Image: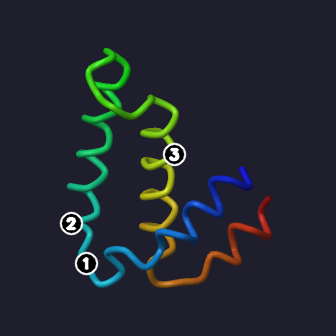
Amino acid sequence: MKRLIEYAKDHRHLWRLEGDHYWLARLQQEVAELTLALDGQHEDRPAHELLQIATICINWLDKDQDLEWLEEEM
């Protein structure tokens, strides 16, 4: 979990000003890449795609707040 939080923090500046449909499109893109990775047709491993998916979800939830709420939950 620590790695996930750090990865999310490192990428939290991305797309901060974008709307929900943009976030959804990025999430769908990563899910498609996960599908390819599971079939061995993508350069990244499934674990990395899952990390990216989780990061998008965390930062989407957090885009108007601060990640401190997540750290307190851990």
State the residue position of label 1.
18
Q: Earlier in the sequence, mark 3 or mark 1?
A: 1
Left or right for 70, reference 45: right
Mark 2 vs mark 3, foreground winner is: 3
Residue at 26% x, 69% y is 20
State the residue position of label 3.
51
Going by the numbered disc 3, the residue's amino acid type is Leu
Mark 3 vs mark 1, foreground winner is: 3
| Quarter of the C terminus within the rendering | bottom right
Q: Which element is circle 2 on? A: helix
Residue at 54% x, 70% y is 10
> Can you tell which mark lies on residue 22?
2
Disc 3 and disc 1 in contact, CB within 8 angstroms: no
Q: Earlier in the sequence, mark 2 or mark 3?
A: 2
Residue closest to the far front: 43
Q: Looking at the image, is 62 positioned above or below residue 47?
A: below
Residue 52 locus on image (x, y percent): 44, 49
Residue at 57% x, 60% y is 7
Residue at 51% x, 73% y is 62
Crowd band around label 3 with a 10 angstrom C-alpha radius: few (<14), some (14–19), many (20+): some
Residue 34 locus on image (x, y percent): 35, 32
- Identify the image quadrant of residue 15: bottom left
Q: Which element is circle 1 on? A: loop
Q: Which element is circle 3 on? A: helix
Label 2 to label 1, Cα distance in Å? 6 Å
Disc 2 and disc 1 in contact, CB within 8 angstroms: yes
